[in-house]
Image (cartoon, coloured by chain):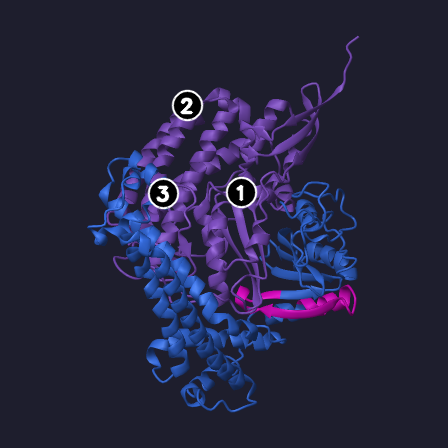
Amino acid sequence: MIRTEELLLNVGPQHPSTHGVFRIVVKLDGEVITEATPVMGYLHRGTEKLAESLNYTQIIPYTDRMDYVSAMTNNYVLVHAVEKMMNIEVPERAEFLRLIVMELQRVASHLVWWGTYLLDIGAMSPFLYAFRDREIIIDLFNEISGARLTYNYMRVGGVKWDAPSGWIDKVRDFIPYMRKRMDEYDRLVSGNEIFLARIKGVGQYDADTAIAYGLSGANLRCTGVDWDLRKTEPYSLYDRFEFDVPLGQKGDCYDRYLIRLQEIHESLRILEQAVAQFPSGGDTMGKVPRVIRPPAGEVYARIESPRGEIGCYIISKGKAEPYRLKFRRPSFVNLQILPKLLVGETMTNLITILGGVDIVVGEVDC
Amino acid sequence: MSEDNQPTNREKPLLEPDQEPKGPAQAVEGELEASTDNTADDRNNVGESAANEQMEVKQSEMQEVGVKPTDDKGDAPADNAQEKAAEAEVQPVERKGDAPADSAQEKAAEAEAQPAEHKGEAPTEAAADKPARKPLTEEERAARAKAAAEAKAARATAAEGGTVGDSAAEPAAATRPARAPRAPKEEEPEQPKVPSPKQPVLDRLVEQLRADIAPDAVEASIINETDGHMPTVTIKAEHWYQTAQWLRHNPEWACDYLRNLSGVDQESYLAVVYHLISLKTRMEVAVHVKTDREQPSIASVTPIWPTADWNERETYDLFGIAFPGHPNLRRIMMSDDWVGHPLRKDYEQLDSEV
């Protein structure tokens, strides 16, 4: 007689497919998962506590380190919240620069996701392609901010640096280059039968579940819910540009995959328009008091990061430091659905589903 | 790296500011050199950036020192007064350029600006002559302290004028005339008092909640104008679960999406703030629920919005608020044997070594 026994397996915290220090304890019945318990906090740095003793400009570098794959959007959510509280007007040129770097960041972030996701599933070379192309964006960021990952680029009221001469042209040149690459990606991967067999119909959920779990970004839109904050609650200059919000139908990993690739195309579209309309002159900093001290009150600013709705809830008591600062991190919220999705799946699908959620552990733990 | 190892070139002090900050910027530069096509231009940029960054940091330090007294003003008990005070502070900064009569303010600005400029030169001198560095910094420090004191005094008088102007208690002799044109400006926002476009929404919600949940369910209700006229209600903790259910299922509201859940330590009490939205009707509301500091407890809404699960665990972990009804209320960020709840204002680390 075969003796069957429940097996308790620790995946992570040091496991390449967990994208950082994330652990998940799974109970296995043979190859099938019967229970999954995520364990996190390995990267918890207490950003929200630290922020209470820093002034607003000093907090910006900390946002870089939350979602370190998408630091520009994190920068933006904080400065946007403060600007909202203080009613600060941002010069057009600065806002254009912000929008351009945010969309470049979205492309870079999705490229990281694309490369690592395929790596998780077992394809090595797409990772190299993705990082080759991402490198171009990183170089652009390096030129404009002086850093490759943690940019600390935005400020309350504008941006720290104007674009160096020729920078906008480089962005313009990047767009057709990236489009060509996207075709290459599609030819390489998107139609691959083995790949499709691995992700089609895996990790499926419906729109009601997605909404109840508070999912956002591609994780929500893959179920067909048309919810992109760039459209529904336009911030920055997004209402000036034409772009579509790609939607899925089935809510499986394949839909999420297609949406993210399509979002790269849409970001390139936005970039194309932004570069064409980029103002030739103007300031990069608005009129900002010497000490940034928002009036007493509270604000919840939210924007669409590559991973979904990133929010910044600030309570100010009229001081230079926030009284309470809370980040709504899309990775943290999106990850909650994982235990539900994993029950009944096989171990191999754990990697597929976890990768499909697209988390950055720095943001899960904050 | 090579520049760093060489002794500093003292013959060309002009080059120094550019070279000096290279040490800290080295890491960035290493990356830069990897892509060979951008050399001189970028190097300049990096050097400049580091120097400017330094300046900025120091400048903000200065501001901190210079501005201290006004900080206290922000503590005025009533929210309204606070807001006004904040406004009063912001305005003069913008107006500085066009109001030469505003002597006290001007002085403060000067006092602040001076040392900041001084700072900008400091690295040059220090780099040009290394041994001279120490005395220079001391001198500098003295200058800075003096300037800070001046600024403090100037600001204090200015601030006094500001508060006096607000409360209309004492005539502030010196600053009064300069301030005169500002007085009407301050009252301006009060005069129009255009009712918020969301006011009827809020009124209706409060009315409905009083009728459907309990007459005393709503403790307070305001329109949060800074946050895009967000209707904000404070619900009594004992009525919260029922209210949450109502907000979720009432066809008019149908708040199916809990976008944010945040704990707050207000020192005299703890609170949880929920930001709700309906993806169908686009109705939005922020709900505050207050709870006692000693025995904090708020009904869990995880059965209504599963997304509250980890958010409530996080709030429990960091604030110590209990959520009865939660299926699995354990710590999530801190380790299970952690003592205390770090985001509380009175939190003290058990192990100071950490």
Amino acid under disc 2: Ser
Q: Is residue A199 visible?
A: yes
Chain name for mark 3: A
Q: Residue at x 33, y 49 (%)?
A: B21
Residue A32's spot in the image, x, y percent? Answer: 68, 22
Which SS class for mark 2? helix
Query: Looking at the image, is A313 positioned above or below residue A196?
Result: below
Instruction: Give the chain coloured purple.
Output: A
Residue B132 horizontal side relative to residue B175, left or right: left
Q: Which chain identifier belongs to the blue chain? A: B
Q: Nearer the viewer, mark 1 or mark 2?
A: 2
Q: Position of residue B179 (x, y in %)?
A: 43, 86
Horizontally, residue A69 falls left or right of residue B288, namely left
Crowd tier of the residue under label 3, counting other residues whose Cα lies within 10 Å: few below 14, some 14–19, many 20 or above: many
Q: Is residue B308 magenta?
A: no
| Residue ID for mark 3 | A268
Tell me the quarter of the image containing the N terminus of chain B: top left
Q: Position of residue B150 (x, y in %)?
A: 42, 75
Q: Say the numbered circle drawn on residue A221.
A: 1
- The residue sitting at the left extreme is B11
Q: How many other residues sit within 10 Å of disc 1, few (<14), some (14-19) or many (≥20)?
A: many
Up-down: is A304 above or below B291?
above
Label for residue A125? Answer: 2
Distance from disc 2 to disc 3, alpha carbons, whole Å, reads 24 Å
Q: Is residue B219 magenta?
A: yes
Label 1 marks which chain's residue? A
Q: Which residue is more in the foreground, A364 or A200?
A: A364
Write the residue at 30% across / 44% down.
A171
* Magenta residue span: B205-231
